[in-house]
Image: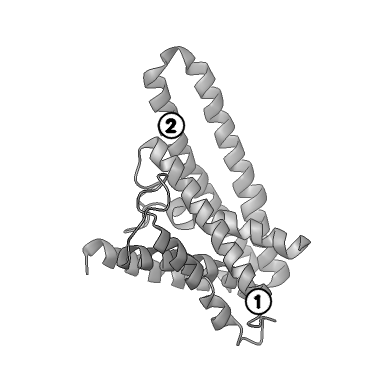
Amino acid sequence: MSQNLLKRIITSIVLLSLFLIINFSHKYIFVFVILIVGITICIEANNIFLKLVESKLLKKNKFIKKFNLKFLILNLITFFYIFFIFCYFSYKIHLVESPIFFLYLIFICFFTDIGGYAFGKILGGKKLTTISPNKTVSGSIGSFMFSIIPLFLFSNLNYLDLELTLINVIFCLIVSLVSQIGDLFISYLKRRANIKDTGKILPGHGGILDRVDGIIFAVPFSYLLLKFI
């Protein structure tokens, strides 16, 4: 086992333990933590945008004001999305649906990542896209397959009205798809900014945004599915 993989496993266990404690604690603690996560995401996103702008400035110095405006707009959009969509919808799901259902959604994203990493490393094969060279077709298939595991785990809980039905399987697959697209989108931004990780706060994983890149898109989308469909 490589040292980096060991770091990833240990960090994942610690993060999962902390998440379980926070998720089932008082709602105000949950809100406080989700806001802290939101602030961290905005800071890490700002660093990505700064790298993007700096690379442009080196090539086109006469467009400094133009790129400063783009930098400001990108940060404003990120701030609005993270706090008024991701954080707000996370709170709504946690409060209205239940902490267990929020855990269920996070587990779908979590197992999506595990499936993608495991199948990608073991099977390898054809690259999924040029946006992220490490992503493979086999990894994406593994992500879809593993995303259904939480349904098997949570269907036996009395707290959730979940059954092994086709509609619930489709729900898992859709959430997994959105999570994968979110992962690819952040990977695209990092690739354009020429950086590997969004931060160094999580050993073996990078930054908070590296860890929740799919979640910040999957959770709001899940809320919209529940609310309108």
- Residue drawn at (45%, 41%), measured in percent from left and top? 189
Residue at coordinates 42% horizontally, 59% vertically from top-left?
137
Q: Which of the labelled discs sits on residue 52, or is there none?
A: 2
> In x, y percent, where is residue 104?
58, 73
Image vertical order of residue 54 relative to residue 162, above or below: above
Q: Quadrant of the N terminus?
A: bottom left
Q: Is residue 111 left or right of residue 194?
A: right
The kind of residue tagged 1 is Leu
Q: Which mark is residue 166?
A: 1
Which one is nearer the viewer's eye here, 29 or 89? 89
**Rendered image quadrant of residue 8:** bottom left
Q: Secondary structure at mark 1?
A: helix
Amino acid type, callout 2: Leu
Task: Please tell me which residue is depicted at 64% across the width and 67% down the height of the picture.
Answer: 27
Q: How is the image coloured?
A: one colour
> For the point 37% across and 20% down, which residue is it?
58
Q: Kindly indicate whether the residue at mark 1 contacts the one at mark 2 (C-beta within 8 angstroms).
A: no
Q: Is residue 33 visible?
A: no
Mark 2–mark 1 distance (CA, rounded to whole Å): 43 Å
Across and down, in percent, residue 54 comes to 40, 26
The tag earlier along the polypeptide, 2 or 1, is 2
Q: Is residue 223 above or below residue 14?
A: above
Furthest toward the top, the residue is 62
Indicate the position of residue 31 as horizontal and vertical percent values. Answer: 62, 60
Residue 95 appears anywhere in the view: yes
Kind of element beneath mark 2:
helix
Camera-side residue: 132 or 76?
A: 132
Provide residue 128's location: percent of width, then percent of height.
42, 53
Mark 2 residue crowding within 10 angstroms, few (<14) / some (14–19) / many (20+): many
Nearer the camera: disc 2 or disc 1: 1
